[in-house]
Amino acid sequence: MISGILLLAAPIFAHHGYAAYDMTTTKTIKGTVTNFEMVNPHSQIDLDSKAADGTIEHWVVEGLSVRGLEAQGFKFNILKPGDEIMVTCSPAKNGAHSGVLIKLTLPDGTVLPKTSAPE
């Protein structure tokens, strides 16, 4: 009985929302792409950025769903490991090197999103 209830409750926790992020502030990170996954329910950009003290910080930036990113001009092959990009995000409240994507500047200077899109 209890296992059945837990099984039915699992989808409720599947979408976490943005409660872990400070959506009232932004942070811009310049770095090198290490991985890009355009997947559902949220896409992810991993990048390494050099901190002021010279250490490398690994950042994970969460994006919209595939449909949402496509509506903003993203394509599956738009980012490759080694690409130098600039990301503006709403950072994690706990100081972790993570955030929610607001704006992406590609190596050629193209800025995305081109339009606003639903999640």
Image: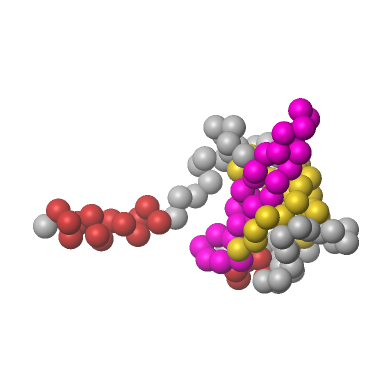
- In the visual, does 86 lie left or right of 69? right
Q: Quadrant of residue 115?
A: bottom right
Question: Which image quarter is the C terminus in?
Answer: bottom right
Q: Nearer the viewer, residue 110 or 116?
A: 110
Q: Nearer the viewer, residue 78 or 10?
A: 78
Question: Which image quarter is the N terminus in?
Answer: bottom left
Q: Nearer the viewer, residue 54 or 116?
A: 54
Magenta-drawn stretch contains 77 = no
Query: Residue 7, position in %: x, y?
Result: 24, 60
Q: Residue at x 35, y 55 (%)?
A: 12
Magenta-drawn stretch contains 61 = yes
Q: Can residue 71 be seen?
A: no
Query: Residue 18, position in %: x, y?
Result: 53, 46
- For this orientation, the residue located farthest to the left is 1
Q: Residue at x 65, y 45 (%)?
A: 59
Q: Can residue 109 be seen?
A: yes
Query: Residue 73, position in %: x, y?
Result: 74, 69
- In the visual, does 107 lie left or right of 35? right
Region rendered in magenta: 38-63
Query: Residue 89, position in %: x, y?
Result: 69, 45
Q: Residue at x 65, y 61 (%)?
A: 36
Colour style of the rendered protein structure: secondary structure
Q: Residue at x 88, y 58 (%)?
A: 109
- Count the labels in the image: 0
- For this orientation, the residue located farthest to the right is 108
